[in-house]
């Protein structure tokens, strides 16, 4: 599908909408769509995504600013229509090449009303492909812009429902505000939130990103990290049994065991086979992940640090430790710690971690973990944000289905 994205400016211009535009373009491209951007300023930021710079789309273009000054003073002059026609001559033919046009903020703000008028008239005449109006900001709902807005055309374009277009807002508050402006029901307006790119935010290593995608770790809720070599003293079978019980409370709970076989004891290979068999017996395939099975590549410290950022908690059931560096790593990463009640881990964790006895029932340990995760507001918010507000999840749940619905 060919999709045109439209805004006043594009990256590398810095701005919230420009950032969203770039994320949308990349996500749509990854989904197999051919995406092109039309903006008044900007340049190509991804070789897969052409950026067409048409200066009259820019909110800071000299012609646009001159007309805007007249409009701010309440004057609708022939200069407005002349500029609208010039924009139409430059843009309308280009947009007809596409299966879908998505315009960001153009029908929401008064930064380039000739552009908004051109889009409206082409949409009303049926000379555009399907049109989505993506509203981030609403001029008519913002007191600071009220002195620049006036009754009648073209200012009313920003507060009237365009029946030829689909309206999208970025929050429930915006939906309520736009519904009040349009006089339409809120049900006619879609909400698609903005998000965070976890890979960029955490500066994840490429190998980490591949493993997250291959193992579908982004779907885990919560994700427990067990950074340990596969040796019997690490007591990994208890972690698997705890995970079974946790999944009664958290059906998407997952466990990531990062270590390879211990290097010095030939019996460790048999221990790994025992763990894989136990995982299958407990029906945990797809929930308990062994990096030693998932990749033959070495797992450097940088990847372990990445997984601390991505995980929701540390689960460390070791029977014996000389020190216990994962407790410190989890602490520095601000992650809740659930670990075996052995002296050296108490020495490190003090009163700030949750301990469980090694002879406790897995179900009791799972209840203990669930109670703490449920009581920590920061932990709950972090898990909800990762599930609902990452760009990958937003595209899968909202943007992809919307594109298919509007065009198909």
Image: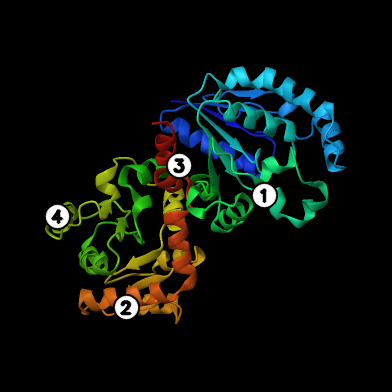
- Viewer-closest of 262 and 153: 153
Q: Quadrant of residue 239?
A: bottom left
Q: Earlier in the sequence, mark 3 or mark 4?
A: 4
Number of callouts: 4
Mark 1: secondary structure: loop
Q: Are marks 3 and 2 in contact (CB under 8 Å)?
A: no
Image quadrant holding the C terminus, namely: top left
Q: Earlier in the sequence, mark 2 or mark 1?
A: 1
- Viewer-closest of 144 and 327: 144
The alpha-carbon separation of the residues under discs 4 and 2 comes to 25 Å
Residue position marked by numbered label 1 in the rendering:
138
Name the mark nearer the viewer: 4 or 1: 1
Q: How is the image coloured?
A: rainbow
Q: Is residue 145 left or right of residue 35?
A: right
Label 2 crowding class (10 Å Cα cut-off): few <14, some 14-19, many 20+? some
Residue position marked by numbered label 4 in the rendering:
280
The alpha-carbon separation of the residues under discs 3 and 2 comes to 38 Å
Image vertical order of residue 309 relative to residue 51, above or below? below
Q: Earlier in the sequence, mark 3 or mark 2?
A: 2
Image vertical order of residue 382 relative to residue 34, above or below? below
**Residue shown at 29% from the left, 57% from the top:** 229
Residue position marked by numbered label 3 in the rendering:
399
Mark 4: secondary structure: helix
The alpha-carbon separation of the residues under discs 4 and 1 comes to 54 Å
Residue position marked by numbered label 2 in the rendering:
368
**Residue shown at 29% from the left, 40% from the top:** 296
Label 1 crowding class (10 Å Cα cut-off): few <14, some 14-19, many 20+? many
């Amino acid at each position: 599908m060919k999709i045109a994205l439209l805004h006043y400016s594009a990256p590398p211009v810095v701005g919230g909408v420009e950032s969203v535009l770039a994320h949308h373009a990349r996500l749509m491209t990854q989904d197999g769509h051919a995406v092109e951007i039309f903006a008044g300023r900007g340049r190509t930021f991804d070789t897969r995504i052409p950026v067409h710079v048409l200066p009259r789309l820019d909110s800071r273009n000299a012609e646009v600013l001159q007309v805007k000054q007249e409009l701010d003073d309440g004057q609708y002059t022939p200069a407005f229509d002349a500029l609208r026609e010039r924009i139409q001559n430059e843009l309308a033919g280009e947009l007809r090449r596409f299966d879908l046009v998505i315009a960001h903020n153009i029908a929401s703000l008064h930064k380039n009303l000739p552009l908004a008028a051109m889009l409206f008239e082409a949409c009303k005449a049926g000379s555009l492909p399907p049109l989505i109006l993506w509203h981030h900001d609403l001029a008519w709902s913002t007191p600071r812009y009220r002195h620049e807005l006036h009754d009648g055309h073209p200012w009313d374009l920003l507060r009237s429902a365009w029946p030829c277009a689909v309206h999208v807002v970025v929050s429930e508050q915006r939906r309520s505000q736009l519904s009040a402006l349009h006089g339409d029901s809120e049900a006619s307006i879609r909400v698609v939130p903005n998000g965070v790119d976890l890979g960029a935010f955490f500066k994840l290593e490429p190998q980490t990103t591949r493993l997250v995608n291959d193992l579908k770790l982004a779907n885990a809720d919560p994700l427990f990290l067990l950074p340990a070599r596969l040796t019997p003293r690490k007591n990994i079978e208890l972690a698997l049994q705890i995970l079974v019980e946790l999944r009664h409370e958290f059906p998407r709970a997952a466990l990531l065991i990062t270590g390879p076989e211990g290097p010095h004891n030939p019996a460790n290979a048999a221990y790994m086979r025992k763990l894989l068999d136990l995982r299958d017996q407990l029906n945990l395939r797809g929930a308990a992940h062994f990096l030693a099975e998932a990749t033959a590549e070495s797992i450097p410290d940088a990847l372990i640090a990445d997984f601390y950022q991505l995980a929701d908690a540390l689960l460390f059931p070791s029977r014996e430790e000389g020190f216990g560096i994962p407790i410190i790593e989890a602490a520095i990463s601000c992650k809740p710690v659930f670990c075996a009640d052995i002296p050296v881990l108490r020495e490190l964790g003090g009163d700030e971690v949750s301990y469980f006895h090694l002879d406790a029932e897995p179900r009791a340990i799972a209840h203990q973990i669930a109670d703490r995760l449920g009581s920590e507001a920061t932990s709950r918010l972090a898990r909800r944000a990762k599930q609902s507000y990452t760009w990958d999840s937003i595209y899968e749940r909202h943007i992809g289905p919307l594109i298919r619905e509007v065009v198909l």
